Amino acid sequence: MHMADALVSPVVAGTLYACSGIAAGYALKRIKSEDINHKIPVMGVLGAFVFATQMINFTIPGTGSSGHLTGGMMLSAILGPEAGFLTMIAILLIQCLMFADGGILALGCNIWNMGFYGCFVGGYLVWNLFMRNGFSKAKIMWASIIGCVLSLQLGAFSVTLETLASGITELPFAAFLSFMQPIHLAIGLVEGLITAAVLLFVYQARPTLLCGFGEDKQDKSMKVSTVAGVIGACALVIGGLLSWFASSLPDGLEWSLLKVTGSTELDAEGGLYQWAGEAQEQVAMMPDYGFAEAESLMGTSLAGIIGALLVLVLCVVISLIINRVKHESHQ
Amino acid sequence: MNHISKAIDQLHAVDNEARSDGWLQCLHPLAKLVVTIVYLVVLVSFPKYQVAGVLLMAVYPITLCILGDVSVSLMWRRIWIVLLLVCFVGLFNPFIDHTPLIRIGSFTLTGGMVSFFTLMIKGCLAVMAAYLLMLTATMETLCHALRKIYVPAVLVTVLMLIYRYLIVFLHEVEHMTQAYALRAPGQRGLNIKVWGSMIGQLLLRSIDRAETVYGSMTLRGFQGEFFTERPQRISHIDWLYTYGWIAFFLILRLL
């Protein structure tokens, strides 16, 4: 689900960086009230643990294929959603830098798609909802499966919206969605089963490690404001991206005109209309929301492409000459 | 050699490359970080049909690779994986977007073909730029740069800890999976019966290790942040490098 830099536009990347930044700010504020110096080494070591276990192939029974772990839900069930989210940010950053899994610019999108949904939807909403009245094996299993499936479905939906809002693919919304959601349903189920197996083992061996275990019912109760905050953040981002994507479709007025006249614009004739139209074309900096002459110079002309290739060849030749001179002067 | 050993080797290779004493490696990490971010923003901001502009953006990674003696083979291994994903997303463009752009005899280059080509080049160049950053700056120096741009200390410290313990855990996982594979020949991956116990045992050991790490860090006076390296000062060359590349990218974008 890691998005590459080429799949996002600067505006979408910036917006998702801002959203993830707000979530990270909230998480930092919450964990700073705890024993942060004790929590940092645990977050670091568990982050390395999750990273390493992502390399293990898990055989999916009856299919012959194998699955992997993402780890957001598991981290949240042990560290708590806030510390889990911050650890996921660090994991995603190392993945993008060291293994090119996801881009630097798309990091905000990846943090949101994998970290936020995994830790706050799966790890906070679902886990707390199930464990509200005490822990049991069945509850841990169902919380893990539902949490992972839900967070991966939301993540896949967001990937679709972010890619479409960036204008990267010509694939229609429904077709793209029909590719993404079923694949991630299967991945979510496998991830849920792995998470459930590990958390059940921990529950039997050392249950106090699980987030919320042994706390008073009052301490475990979910704050309405936090629940509303998590759901509101999901709705805001998904709704925002949806509206962004939908803005290329006719708006309400245009749709009504299309139904009545068969066109989204009214044809007006007469000197005054013509004069006003011409004046607007001259004055408008961004006709139809695009910069005028944007495709003009280095756009798609064959000469432009050939020119670019020549410059690249020249650049390689000059660099090689400088490098050779540098090596010879060293010797 | 399995994929875990390959990952360990790759981590070592990247780290060794970043610790070499080339001129690129000696530049301030903040300069390299800022240039990389600006490069990526400018690169992805090119419209989908502006293939010539995107091609010219290749000047940056190619120049750095040649002048900095950076191992291109390390980079290529990563590029094709990203290209597969990018290819999947853009694959349908030629079949949907039939806008005619260039006619060469009877052949018409459509908008879909150009946008697909542009997307692939963007994918390639973005991976190259990010990888060049890692091949020329160590994780410690990058963390120092992140602190300079006010990334919270908690996040940077966790990042450094994960990076430090990553190799240890990768070795541990490698030993576990090797031992399992020797006892379960012909089996692909871990059987569902041992998912919980194998990973759960590793998790419990990790938490115990975290307690030991916390104890030793406290004994060394840990106060929530690492201070490992003497901060490198930003020199005139760093400024020149940063402003030079940024000006070049902006000129390409505005042309």
Image (spheres, coloured by chain):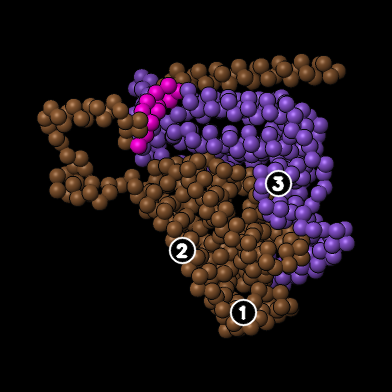
- Amino acid type shown at disc 2: Gly
In-front residue for pair A297/B238: B238
Q: Chain of mark 3?
A: B
Pointer 2 residue:
A232
Image x and y of residue A206, in percent = 74, 78
Look at the image and give the residue range highlighted in magenta: A289-299
SS at circle 3:
helix
Q: Position of residue B50 (x, y in %)?
A: 45, 29
Q: Is disc 2 on the same chain as disc 3?
A: no
Q: Residue at x 67, y 66 (%)?
A: A33
Disc 1 residue type (three-letter)? Asp
- Residue B154 % position (x, y): 70, 56
Q: Are tags 1 and 2 found on a single chain?
A: yes
First in residue order: circle 1 vs circle 2:
1
Q: Secondary structure at mark 1?
A: helix
Q: Quadrant of residue A90?
A: bottom right
Secondary structure under the numbered disc 2 in the rendered image = helix
Few, some or many C-alpha atoms within 10 Å of disc 1 (few <14, some 14-19, many ≥20)?
Answer: few
Q: Which residue is mark 3?
A: B147
User: How far apart are labels 3 and 2 at the CA level?
Assistant: 31 Å
- What residue lies at 40% left-to-right and 35% top-to-bottom? B112
